[in-house]
Image: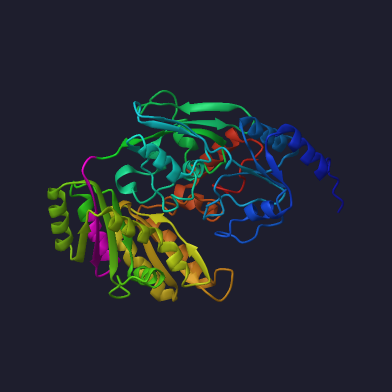
Amino acid sequence: MSVFTAYSQEEVIDELKHRAPHAEIHLDDEIAAKHAANGKAESTIDGRILAYVAVGDKDDIRGVLKTAIKFHLPIVPQTADTSTVIGADGLNGGIILSLARMNKIVEVNEDDLLAVVEPGVINQDLDQAARQHGLFYAPDPASKPISSIGGNVSTNAGGLSGVKYGATKDSVLGLKVMLANGKEIKVGGRTTKQAFGYNLTQLFVGSEGTLGIITEITLRLFPIPIGKKIYGVAFFDNMAKLAEGVHALRISGLYPSMLEGLDGKTVQALDQYKQTHYAKSASSSMLIFMFDDAGETQLQISQKILQEQGAWKIQITDDPAQGEKLIQLRRDMLPAVFANGKYYIMEDMAVPSSKLAEMADYIVQVGDELQVNIYTAGHAGDGNLHPTLLWNDQPQAPANVIEATRRLFHKALDLGGTISGEHAVGMSKNQWNNEELGEDVDVLQHQIKTLFDPMNILNPKRKIN
């Protein structure tokens, strides 16, 4: 069958260069190939992208969108490219729209406790800039040193501090977004209370670049707490016992700012990776916790609660250097686990706090029944677990790994949870919309997508199928 194209590739590229004159446009070269697949979710893509376009300003973004509309080209927004769910990998014949160059911290306002940033700003850079003003940026994903604010907003990233400060959505006050037609809109604002109109701000948060291109973000900042920052570690017989201890701390009124759980296999992997000696057995689990404004009463009560819940080897320190070592231990969890298998799937599910122990037990059960090597860690304080399934024999996930993942998904949903706590949906889970959301909401999701992006050029195949 003959296919007669209306435009040559050269004509498309010429139009792109004309409409986005300040952009860096890379075609089928090393740079384009490097950014087409991030190597975390997929090592290759189907076909090859048309171009990798690193925009320098809003006019460039508008020009890329206009070109995409004219030639019916898919656009994949990308900043730091740290997606783990095939959410920012290139699409065959499409354009990767990189906003990494748009990385200015426009404003840090001490009076209004907010910051205004471009999407390419790195999370850690914003936090460090805020701390120069006696403030801090609360969302703290494990990818904090490398992930961008734009990506964090697009995926509604969580993090280590979520138990006290929430996910990214809880710090977003307002956005500027360029729609598929090239028009920029402003949603939200600079106030913590906003009740006028529909809440479009939160509609764009977590939309994974499928509804518009985020061009500017207004974020809530907090004053650095007065008092000691206290760090601690405690051990439990297993993850289910740890979950019970975490639940007791959550309802105590102590307000810890971090409650991170690691199962025994993960602790053993960290010992091997970091040359430490934390692990007692393959079943015993580690809780890493923190209070960012603790007093002596909090410390005594927390220690009493942990002991009553069966914790042992409880260690507490107010030494920042020792505390940072504990936090870094948690951040090193993934490379430590990945060192134990050639291939992996890292999952992301969250359940109500009261169901965390049951979910932890079920993960062990599934691993044993299907003979799948599973390492589990996560943000235990908000019920968010990351079971990582490893294997060695083939690039594609074997049948038992796929079945194990499906069982874990169904269990999380049965417990009233979600199969995407903070990593977004991408292409990895978009087949599950009907299962998690229900048929009526699934249809509404597609109607919303069509309203904002009638030609389906914005990150198609992601978020919803």
Query: Would residue 220 be counted in the magenta stretch?
Result: no
Query: Would residue 233 be counted in the magenta stretch?
Result: yes
What x and y, as percent, mark residue 168? Answer: 41, 42
Instruction: Decide which of 60, 229 is in the foreground and name it.
Output: 229
What x and y, as percent, mark residue 423? Answer: 46, 52
Quadrant in the rendering for residue 58: top right
Asked if residue 156 can be seen in this view, the reply is no
Instruction: Decide which of 317, 234 is in the foreground and name it.
Output: 317
What x and y, as percent, mark residue 332? Answer: 41, 61
Identify the residue at image location x=39%, y=75%. Answer: 368
Q: Is residue 1 above or below residue 167?
A: below
Which stretch is magenta? 226-247
34 to the left or right of 388: right
Q: Which residue reaches farthest top?
A: 196
Instruction: Decide which of 221, 446 is in the foreground and name it.
Output: 221
256 to the left or right of 398: left
Colour style of the rendered protein structure: rainbow
The N terminus appears in which quarter of the rendering? bottom right
Asked if residue 94 can be seen in this view, the reply is yes
Identify the residue at image location x=38%, y=68%. Answer: 274
What x and y, as percent, mark residue 72? Answer: 72, 40
Q: Is residue 212 above or below residue 94?
A: above
Instruction: Decide which of 236, 457 is in the foreground and name it.
Output: 236
401 to the left or right of 386: right
